[in-house]
Amino acid sequence: MNLERLPNEEKLSLCRKYYLGGFAFLPFLWLVNVVWFFQEAFLKPTYTEQLQIKTYVKRSALGLVLWVTVLTTWITIFQHFRAQWGAVGDYLSFTIPLGIP
Amino acid sequence: MTASVFFGCTFIAFGPAIALFLFTIAREPLRVIFLIAGAFFWLVSLLLSSLVWFISVQISNKDSAAQQKGLLIFGVVLSVLLQETFRFAYYKLLKKANEGLLALSQEETMPISIRQLAYVSGLGFGFMSGAFSVVNILADSVGPGTVGIHGDSQHYFLSSAFMTMAIILLHMFWGVVFFDACEKQRWWAVAAVVISHLVVSCLTFQNPEYVGSLVPTYIIMFLMGVWAFYSAGGSLRNLRLCLSCIDKDFLLANHRPR
Amino acid sequence: MDFLSNRWINNLIVCWFFIGVSCNSVEKKIYVHLNYTVPCVRLLNATHQIGCQSSLSGNVGVLHVLESEGDLDWVLRSGPNPPYMVILEPPLFNRSIMMKLKNSSGRVAGVAAVAINTNPPPDFSPHNTCPNENTGVYSENYDPALAHCNKTVWNPLGNGLSYEEYDFPIFSLNDDNDTQVIRQCYWDHNRAVNGSTPQYPLCAMQLYSHMSAVTDTATCMRRNDINFSISPEVVCDPLGDFNVWASSKPLNNTAKGHKMGESVVIAAARLDSRSFFFDIAPGAESAVSGFVTLLAAVHALHNATQEAPPNRTILYTFFQGETFDYIGSSRMVYDMENKQFPVDLDNVHSVLEIGQVGFAAGSGLWLHSDPVSRRNSSVNDTVKDLISNLRSAAADLNVSVDEPRVSQPLPPSSFQRFLRARPIPGVVIEDHQSQFTNSFYESMYDNAEYLNISYSPDLTPEKQLETVTDTAKALTDVATMVAQALYKQAGGAESQLSSIKADALIVTQMLYGFLVKSNNSWFQQLVSSELMGHLNDRPPNLYVGVTQQSSVPTLLVQHLLANLTGSAINITQDDCQNQREDKDDKENKHMYSYLWVQGVAPPNNTTREGFCVRSTVRLSKALSPAFDLQQYTSQDYSTWTESRWKTIKGRIFLVASHELEMFTLGVGVSILLMSLLLTYIISLKADILFSSGREPTNATY
């Protein structure tokens, strides 16, 4: 879809859909929202809906950063301590590496 | 560690071909199509020659070394002849296709000249034959071992890569010369292409004396390159002109900022 | 093969593609695959992992043939091309060198030990000094003074190598050609001539033995059970197989638990052994000498027990997996306690176990008994009876019999598991007074040569099979003694004793089959056609293995026992395999088992004439109760598991110097960059370069 050809109201509604969709534990929607609407929100000459789009993009970015931090922290902790956790670590794993504690 | 050998050999074998593809072919869809069609024609020729080879090996006496050697030479010669036959067939097909293209397009001129076709199809042949000659060698170059436990030279990978590069470029030159000769009905030039192809293929019987096969191959490649250059419309004058205008551009480029 | 022609290779590829045979000539130019290697594999128990493993893609190292212990410095410190793959000659495969290699912190990629069949080192036992230390009867609660081999160290030569953990692969090179190729490659490429560093290309070796299981049995069994991943994988399997048992008179096998009025004398021997490497476990002295003697004794008793049955029943048992914390005997005792066996412990009158008796002729026989249970007077009386029976039987024979000091505990034996359950009178016959006479306990050198079983090379296999060796004669005497003592112990008539004689020919044939070639004409006629396929020209491997695969020695003993004690009956193969004597027979299978064996081929005919053997021989599970109870950290039962693996292979090849590799890469990159530049310029100037032709503009390039 080409954003250029879309009227401003539809841009806003699209951006809102992506923003709301992200709350369903879908941080990638926020990522798409940020990348896709960044130009619209911050680089284009102002128009009425832009303020709203800006808010959505900012919030999506915030949510995305939150997700990234939480996931990175968890993955680091999990990878580091999985072997020490023993049974718990095994039950939390989806694939267990062969030949490694 | 030995990934470096893999990438080194890949770049040697396919570096020139990749560069040519990127700068002269990739941007024009029609050329890409003809390149792939050329590669396909080469593949079909390989399929036929391997069928013949398969049958003749089954028939032959597997214990007789002389017979096996003879069979090998027969296989190589047959494969070369088949490849050149298919090059001719491809030429004929392209002539037909070009007429069709001309009829379709609104413009007066052909969308792609026969010289361009010659170059593109030659490179297509080269790509495919190069890939087939070096892919399984490349696969084993990843390591951890290198050739030599049975006393072979450890420059096997390097020389195979250089040989493949020569084969790819040669196919390109042969394509140009061959098509040009067909256009002008100069059958001796066609014969020269076939004979040089035969010579290059038979030179590989020299292996593992890699110098003995690589040096003549590169000499032939150079000669074919010059010939192809001329038959593609190049001349010494053009070359000089070109070199001087590079200088001019260079000078201009240096002047502009001032 | 030479690099003949690109086209030639093309043709070949396509050809082979058609034939469907994958064969790569370039691969053949680079690698030499090792034909017959035996790895050391990873085993796990409740607390530890032992054995070896490589990385997932195999360990690669530059070959170094270790010539002396001083040479180790090259590998551990001074050599310029680590990591090294160390080739060890047999005398150097010892604890001090292996420990140095183990602690080398990454300079050792792996070890390959050369296997030899002649002139082994004077002694070598990779086992513990105190075998099965924690699962025998002598715990702190039983008698603190006797626990942990405090009184007697049974295997003082044991260096414990088998129970170490190595983070590199260790292989045994069992093929002389392989060894020769490796040595040649080392001499040609890697040998440092008076102190200089060897020049590239160097000869290297890659060993694959990646093990799936890790840490301990509890971990790996837990991972076996987790199966919500896309590809659930089993990482380890419990060690175990089957015990073989038979009784002198048929016992109802369906009615488990206590049998009223039944009293049994158990005659036991162990079936398994091990060595440092996975599937070389000849166990000549440690297992074969004992169970062959018991088999011969069973055969000797056959007629007497049929014609004049003694009051008590004799139960012949062959325990599997005893090396790994008494898997077989602990399971049988567990089954007896839980009414899963035709008799229970109350039915057991006494136990006579035959341990290592291969050197009976030289060192005499020693009758070991348990000092703790003998403090009970009734137990002591029965033990004394048993000993006197043995002594009187030995008196007429060429065997010297003696007792060790009264305070000495039992050597490692299956009987200990019975004592662990309750004080049962019993004796263990061994050929050593205190420490083992066997100087190759649980090692690959505990083979036929060590028992002095050798044949002159000009004899045909048939003649060799029938040659009665001195060892066979000695074991025959032991078997006769055991048989007579058992008969007397079971309350048999004195008058029959003189007729109980073991057959030396059968003993020598069994020794030949278990120690020289399992594929011999005698075994062939006694086994079923399925088992026939597992016979080969090597001695069978006595390593117990995992429960999923049945072990060949177990089945061989089962068939031998059936043939030696059973009777051929004239029924169809179909009925025989369905455990019945005719269509309506539903009773006999409770008392007897039926085996269809191949038999012999009559002269001038190639098809064998099979027949059915009816006997009391049964198999009973020899899987540690810990796995049924799911107590993977059990202190009482064996918890040994064997890791699974995917590839075991080794190959040698040359490695190129780092400089050559970097040179190749450099040439490649510069050719790529140069051609990019050149093509760019030419394509820019194509108009001018190719302008003279008749065709308008934009020519070839």
Image (cartoon, coloured by chain):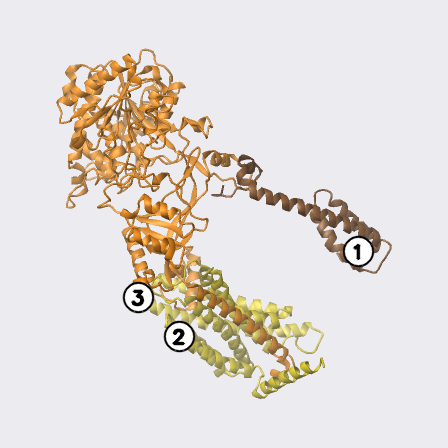
Mark 1 belongs to which subunit? A
- Front residue of this view, candidates B157 and C388: C388
- Front residue of this view, candidates C257 and C404: C404
Q: How far across and down, in percent of the image, does residue B54 sit?
A: 40, 62
B162 to C44, vertically: above or below:
below
Q: How far apart are marks 3 and 1 (CA)?
A: 77 Å
Residue C205 seen in render: no
Kindly identify which numbered label has been placed on residue B211.
Answer: 2
Q: Distance between the residues labelled 2 and 1?
A: 65 Å
- According to the colouring, which chain is brown? A
- Front residue of this view, candidates C59 and B228: C59
- Could you tell me which secondary element the residue under label 1 belongs to? helix
* Dot 2 amino acid type: Val
Q: How far across and down, in percent of the image, does residue B51 sit?
A: 43, 63
Tell me what residue is drawn at x 68 percent, y 83 percent: B252
* Dot 1 amino acid type: Ala
- Could you tell me which secondary element the residue under label 3 belongs to? helix
Q: Are marks 2 and 1 on the same chain?
A: no
Kindly identify which numbered label has been placed on residue B65.
Answer: 3
- Front residue of this view, candidates C91 and C26: C91
Left or right for C404, reference C648: left
Quarter of the image for residue C30 reads: bottom left
The picture's colour for chain B is yellow
Which quarter shows the N terminus of chain C? Answer: bottom left
Q: How far across and down, in percent of the image, does residue C413 sit?
A: 30, 27
Q: Callout 1: 10 Å neighbours few (<14), some, many (20+)?
A: many
Left or right for C512, reference A43: left
Which residue in the structure is indicated by mark 1?
A41
- Could you tell me which secondary element the residue under label 2 belongs to? helix
Q: How far apart are marks 3 and 2 (CA)?
A: 25 Å
- According to the colouring, which chain is orange? C
